[in-house]
Amino acid sequence: ASSAKSWLAFLIKNIMKKLICGLFLVATSVMASQFPPAFALNTINATLLSATTNQTGAALYVEGVKNHTFVIVNATTRTNLVTIQGSLDATNYVTLNLTTNTAVSTNSVVLTAQRWSYLQASVSGLTGTNCNTVVEYLGGN
């Protein structure tokens, strides 16, 4: 009975020692593999809209970006209106900027201190043949 008790105590002692060592290894490995911090100057660039008719482009996910730069190229012989909108849920949009583009023109738009999850652009006034308006998102920080 005494040898069974000592064997049981030895077994419990070794199990506890391995358990403590295992928990220590897990804890140190979790601390060693934390995600790196985000960089303040991360940027995204994309075509928000390339339209030959009146339309709205797809939403672009830009959460975490505060300042935004756009270039609007109007390669038509007519004036049109580009609307840039922001949303927190990709469903309900708020107009952030309206830009009237004269015939065959390039315009830039800079939005500062605008934290949105999604951005999209739309164009109206594209009529006739050979119409093309492009909205490029150059990114931000």
Image: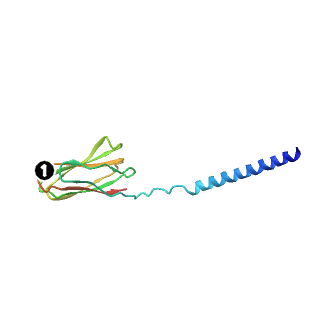
Side of 124 relative to 12 (left or right): left
Residue farthest to the top, as pictured:
92
Quadrant location of the C terminus in the rendered image: bottom left
Image position, residue 112 (x, y; %): 32, 52
Side of 108 relative to 20 (left or right): left
Image position, residue 52 (x, y; %): 18, 53
Location of mark 1 (residue): 127
Q: Residues within 10 Å of mark 1 (few under 14, many from 20)?
A: some
Residue located at (32% from left, 54% from top): 68
Q: How many marks?
A: 1
Image position, residue 20 (x, y; %): 70, 51
- In front: 2, or 93? 2
SS at circle 1:
loop
Residue located at (37% from left, 52% from top): 65
Q: Quadrant of residue 42?
A: bottom left
Side of 53 relative to 15 (left or right): left
Quadrant location of the N terminus in the rendered image: top right
- In front: 41, or 92? 92
Q: Amino acid at mark 1?
A: Thr
Residue located at (42% from left, 57% from top): 40
Residue located at (76% from left, 51% from top): 14
- In front: 75, or 38? 75
Image position, residue 16 (x, y; %): 73, 49
Query: What scheme was used to colour the molecule?
Result: rainbow
